[in-house]
Image (cartoon, grey):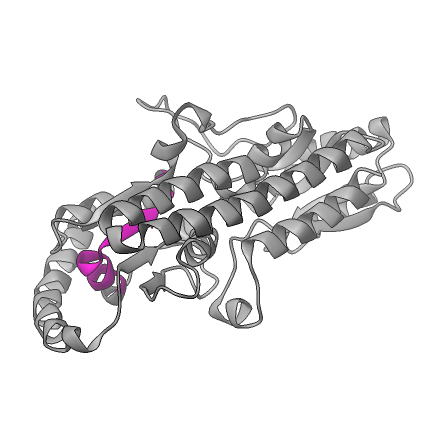
Amino acid sequence: MKKIFAVLLSLVLVAATFAGCSAKESKNDEATKLKVVSTIFPIYDWTENIVGEDIHIDHTMLLSSGADLHNYQPTADDIIKISTCDVFIYVGGESDSWVHDTLESAQNKNMKTINLLEVLGESAKEEEIVEGMQEEGEHEEEESPEYDEHIWLSLENAEKCVKEIARTFAEIDKEDASDYYVNSKAYCDELVELDIKYDEAVESAKNKTLVFGDRFPFRYLTDDYGLTYYAAFVGCSAESEASFETISFLAKKVDELGLTKVMKIESGDGKIAKTIVENTKKKNQKILTLDSMQSITDKDLKEGATYISIMESNLEVLKEALN
């Protein structure tokens, strides 16, 4: 597979050379400051807020069709956009394994890249298997740890990433540096304000445990606020069918803790959560959905979806789940 990707990459970059020539001819007609490529929606929305309305950038969000980060592979057009951009921003986890070869062959050798897991440094968390969670197949010992890629589901992480993106833009585009910093400061203030609301909601909650009949991409969020969780699968799992043992364990946890809600994520069909409910004593728990922002499309953007609006909606769901 890697050899096939390398061949395709070479062909695409030849095409990019000619595309680049055409772009240069019309460059004088553009008022674009930077050409930026962001892989996923949260990064795209953070960047849009850093740039603001007064600075024009050529900004591409790669995963705009609802594709899951874990299954994504770049198209020829995506590779060309990455190869010729000024700034490329990505998460940097296992799902971005294709990035290395793409950047190695990039046309723009002055391109700035922002690997957000590297930005977080020691704050990045490894994938975690908790009690009752179904593991995937046989696990071989890995030379390096596999990190939880869902870094954006922490408001604290978001603030760190926003500051680094703003710093990078200011370094490249010194003329507008002050605007990037002012905009990022205003946006970070909004993130801090929402973070305080999450703290207050969890502090006043009746219980501090969530049960997920689904994948669990919310570890950063639960760790931020001291919540306990049980789930069918880890956040990056490709599994869709839970074993009897997993269902039984989670149903017993719901009974043991007296929970009235069972959780799922936005892309889940809810079958596992329903089966958990059916195996509890009361069989009347409500199923709630937290949005992990892994399925955002261009249509959602046009309808006004933002990172903060989704995190605000998740807060309301969390309040209901914990009470």
Give the quarter of the image for residue 163: top left
Vertical position of residue 50 compared to residue 261: above or below: below
Numbered range of the magenta stretch: 78-93
**Can I make out residue 104 in this image?**
yes
Q: Quadrant of the C terminus?
A: top right
Whole-percent x, y for residue 84 in the image: 18, 60
Vertical position of residue 219 compared to residue 307: above or below: above
Whole-percent x, y for residue 229 in the image: 68, 30
Q: Find out whether residue 82 is within the magenta segment.
A: yes
Q: Residue furthest right?
A: 282
Q: Is 291 on the left or on the right of 11, as rendered? A: right
Instruction: Looking at the picture, tell me which residue is in the foreground, 31 or 151.
Output: 31
**Can I make out residue 236 in this image?**
no
Q: Is 195 on the left or on the right of 255, as rendered? A: left
For the point 84% across and 35% down, which residue is it? 259
Q: Is 89 on the left or on the right of 254, as rendered? A: left
Whole-percent x, y for residue 214 in the image: 63, 44
Instruction: Looking at the picture, tell me which residue is in the foreground, 211 or 18.
Output: 18
Q: Is 254 on the left or on the right of 179, as rendered? A: right
For the point 23% across and 60% down, which residue is it? 79
For the point 36% across and 21% down, which residue is it? 141
For the point 31% across and 55% down, which residue is it? 176
Whole-percent x, y for residue 97 in the image: 29, 42
Q: Find out whether residue 201 is within the magenta segment.
A: no
- Total labels: the figure holds 0
